[in-house]
Image: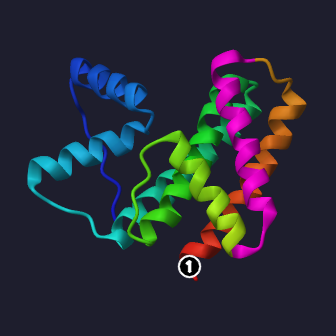
Amino acid sequence: MGILELIIPDRVERQLRERSRSIGVSVEEVALEALCKGLGVTLDPAERAEVYLRISETYFAEGEELLSEGKLANASEKLWGAAALMVKAVAAKRGMILRSHGSLHEFAVKLSLEQGDPSLRSLFAAASVLHQNLYESWLPEIAVRGYARDVRKLLEKLKSLIAG
């Protein structure tokens, strides 16, 4: 699976970002869906899972970089995105598409029960606190760092479910 960088007009990028914010998904998801729709291509579950997994890993690395720069709200956004996309990757591997925050939380709880691992639920809840911090920017740095470690643990656990 390749990575392609597209150069698009600012006006299109603004619309892409606006759409992303309005429906609560990543810019990459909006762009990929539009591209697939325009080309008449349907992603199979394994392809969708791989895309989500790779974007999740990229977001996590970006979140860690932003955290090292002291940009706590921006780091929180990327870390939350990494967690949400990895949950979506597990769901996609099962042929499911999650489109809302509620469905993400429901699926995280389902996984926690299925796996007999309550930490999946609590680690995802920690990621949700980071999502809230994006908008309110109230968490101290030590808390964001702690939640970043929680997101790392969550990603590792969820990635093993995709591979297995």
- Which residue of the protein is positioned furthest toward the right in this rendering? 142
Image point 72% across, 18% down: which residue?
A: 137
Per the picture, the main secondary structure of the magenta-coloured stretch is: helix
Locate residue 84, reporting x and y percent. Answer: 56, 48
Q: Is residue 123 magenta?
A: yes
Q: Which residues are magenta?
A: 115-137
Locate residue 66, reporting x and y percent. Answer: 67, 32
Image point 52% across, 66% down: which residue?
A: 90
Image point 35% across, 22% down: which residue?
A: 18
Image point 11% across, 47% down: which residue?
A: 38
Locate residue 34, reporting x and y percent. Answer: 21, 43
Viewer-nearest residue: 136 or 70: 136
Locate residue 95, reporting x and y percent. Answer: 38, 69
The answer to whether residue 16 is above or below residue 103 is above
> Element under label 1?
helix
The answer to whether residue 54 is above or below residue 65 is below
Q: Which residue is mark 1?
A: 163
Q: Quadrant of residue 111?
A: bottom right
Q: Is residue 52 magenta?
A: no
Count numbered badges in the picture: 1
